[in-house]
Amino acid sequence: MIADPTLDDIHRALTFPGFDHLDAWLRMAPRPHHTLHDLDGDVNGGRSAGVLILLYPVDGRLTFVLTRRTETVATHRGQISLPGGAFEPQDRSLADTALRETCEELSTCEDDIQMLGSLTPLHVVVSGFVIHPFVAYTPLRPDFRGEPTEVAEILEMPLADLLDDAIKVEERWDFQGVGRDIPFYRVNGLPLWGATAIILSEFEMRLRAVLNGR
């Protein structure tokens, strides 16, 4: 049985010494990866964005929220993603960007959201963004209400599921006539792939490093 990570595990995972984030990214990166993501490239070379892994308890288990994007948004239509978006001039920091976007997308604007830490910024060549992932916690499950022009579906995933190899799949997909090997997490029967999968792979492998040392 997969152990449920605790908040203490998460604190330790986010500060795990000597962690190899590139190895973790490559586990869930499309291949050849350089066509979609400059995995270890210049994080100062694109427009900044912040995304949030928001943790909260459901029946005593840490859970986090994902969204399936509508078919009318400008980019990544229909894909599963973490709440977040582009840095705006009114944002004091990229952590504030992640919180603001989560509030706008999901009406999750609680004052008691506690920032726990961050993951490694990821440069996504195809969109030109450098994504800065943050991890946060709120003690009560939010009353999610998706913004209808952006959010087609709200998905909740127990954090322990991220450690379940049974939800990992790899398929050969066609992109404009070129075959790519695409690893993804299967969430509610849907593929979670691309930048979001790469970010979550880092979080997963950090947690594994901590849990394996229990």
Image (cartoon, rainbow, N blue to C red):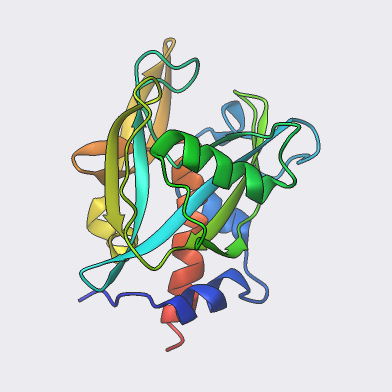
- Across and down, in percent, residue 165 comes to 28, 59
Q: Residue at x 45, y 23 (%)?
A: 76
Query: In the figure, 138 relative to 103: above or below?
Result: below
Q: Quadrant of residue 33?
A: top right
Percent across and percent down for residue 137 are: 46, 64
Query: Does 54 sit above or below residue 62?
Result: above
Q: Is residue 12 above or below residue 22?
A: below
Would you say 45 lies left or right of 130 here?
right
- Which is more toward the observer, 179 or 135? 135
Q: Nearer the viewer, residue 120 or 7?
A: 7
The number of numbered discs placed on residues in the rendered structure image is 0
Q: Is residue 108 left or right of residue 11?
A: left
Residue 88 in picture, x, y percent from top left? 70, 31
* Quadrant location of the C terminus in the rendered image: bottom left
Q: At 28% across and 43% down in the image, what residue appears?
A: 155
Quarter of the image with the N terminus in it? bottom left
Q: Residue furthest bottom?
A: 214
Which quadrant holds residue 18? bottom right
Provide residue 173's location: percent of width, then percent of height: 35, 24
In the image, what residue occupies the spot 44% across and 10% down? 176
- The picture quadrant where one finds residue 130 is top right
Asked if residue 30 shows in the view, the reply is: no
